[in-house]
Image: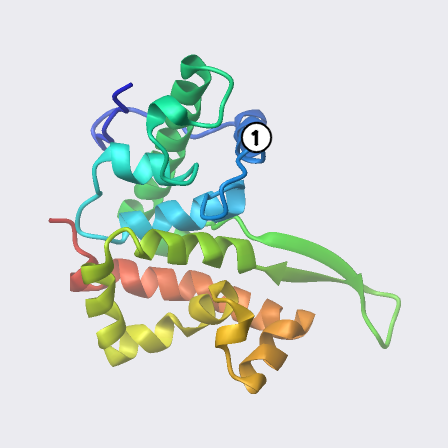
Amino acid sequence: MKLPQYNPAVDNPPLTEQEMDELDELLSFIEAEDAVADMESLDGYLTALLLSPALPEADVWVTRVWGGQDPAKAPFGSGKQTKKVAQLVLRHLASIDRQLRADPETLEPLFGIAEVEAEDSDEVQEIVDAELWCIGFLQGTAMTPEHWNRIFDDAELADALTPIVLLGSDPETLTPQQQELVGSPEGRDTLSRQVPDAIAELARHPLCAKA
């Protein structure tokens, strides 16, 4: 089955909340370790792809969502269901693309939100957790490594990407101080809230301009 290529000129409506839930459920059935198996990770993965000058072929980047398997061997019930997943993914890609093109400051990444009671009061605090999103983003950078090597070689951009790298990396690759930071809800919240600004900075940079 040939997967459709993304065409920004095509009117792809944003996913409804119901469609997002449906796609999230379909992704949850994927067992491959290197798959993009939830909506938060998918959102980050697609954002990284869109910050590259050009998308890889659909047969490469779409199949990576379910672990890089051939479309005919996708872990869904039928070819029809595989096509539906691909179409939903393309529509979500289009939605992110429109936001980045219009104004990257308005991008609303899909982050996890937890409510916890404050230690010194009965007030409930919202803790933002972008770990899954950042894991997906780093998976996306691996699809165009030459481009992202240039990004990380730029000192200012590499510094802006630090929150994403800390939240999305294997904790065993981090220093003890970094592990302590990402291991606390407060630290994760602080890093997570820095991610949208990092994405906006990348989106405005000439290195991320479309080819």
Give the image's coloring scheme.
rainbow
Question: Could you tell me residue 90's position as x and y percent?
Answer: 35, 31
Q: Position of residue 167 (x, y in %)?
A: 51, 66
Question: Does residue 130 appear in the picture of this structure?
Answer: no
Residue at 81% of width from left, 70% of height from top?
118
Q: Quadrant of residue 7?
A: top left
**x then y, percent, for residue 8:** 23, 33
Toward the viewer: 144 or 6? Answer: 144
Q: Secondary structure at mark 1?
A: helix
Q: Quadrant of residue 98?
A: top left
Is residue 137 among what the camera can see?
yes
Q: Which residue is labeled 1 in the image?
A: 17
The residue at the point 59 percent across, 73 percent down is: 182
Which residue is drawn at the image coordinates 18% and 46% (left, top)?
54
**Vertical placement of 79 versus 183: above or below?**
above
Position of residue 151 in the picture relative to residue 25 (left or right): left
